[in-house]
Image (spheres, grey):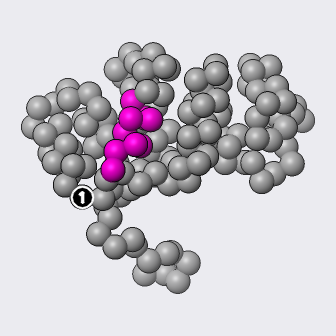
């Protein structure tokens, strides 16, 4: 293993988007049951990228409304066996999404909180983010 990769957490498995989606939707009986058993049976790790992709899949492929996705991700992240990468940033992004910002945009902003600004050509993001986010949103 390269020296720049951290050592894995003991007895924790990182999960892919399809595991989360099967757990949340129950759309495939066999895979959903396996996802349920995995998540109920041991510690799992939800990366920020998987949370973001789950949002996209649930909205685009399953027709979930943003509020339904927010509720589902909060409930999933609150399970005792689930560890969310950068949980504070994800929780804040979910709060921002609940207030009307796109979850992906909210996540971009929370992950850039240590920066002085977030540059974008996205006028919708510029209007919606305003000055209430964790970082100033500007147009170059």
Residue tagged by mark 1? 42
- Residue 101 spot, x, y in % from top left: 65, 24
For residue 52, side relative to residue 96 (left or right): left
Task: Relative to 12, say whether 67 is above or below.
Answer: above
Is 25 displayed left or right of 1 in the figure? left
- Along the line of sight, which residue is nearer the eye, 30 or 77? 77
User: Could you tell me which residue is drawn at 64 percent across and 29 percent down?
Assistant: 96
Extent of the magenta region: 72-80
* Residue 114 shows in the view: yes
Q: Residue at x 60, y 27 (%)?
A: 97
Image quadrant assignment for residue 93: top right
| Spot occupied by residue 79 in the image (x, y as percentages of width and height) | 34, 45
Tell me what residue is drawn at x 56 percent, y 40 percent: 91
Q: Work out whether 96 lies above or below 91.
A: above
Quarter containing the C terminus: top right
In this view, 132 is above or below 6? above
């Amino acid at each position: 293993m390269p020296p720049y990769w951290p050592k894995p957490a003991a007895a924790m498995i990182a999960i892919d988007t399809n595991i989360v989606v099967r757990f949340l939707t129950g759309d495939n009986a066999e895979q959903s049951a396996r996802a349920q058993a995995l998540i109920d049976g041991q510690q799992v790790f939800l990366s920020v990228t998987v949370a973001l992709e789950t949002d996209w899949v649930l909205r685009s492929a399953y027709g979930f409304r943003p509020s339904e996705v927010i509720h589902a991700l909060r409930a999933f992240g609150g399970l005792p066996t689930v560890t969310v990468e950068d949980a504070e940033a994800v929780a804040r992004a979910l709060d921002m999404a609940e207030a009307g910002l796109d979850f992906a945009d909210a996540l971009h902003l929370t992950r850039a909180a240590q920066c002085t600004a977030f540059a974008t050509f996205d006028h919708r993001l510029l209007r919606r983010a305003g000055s209430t986010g964790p970082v100033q949103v500007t147009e170059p």
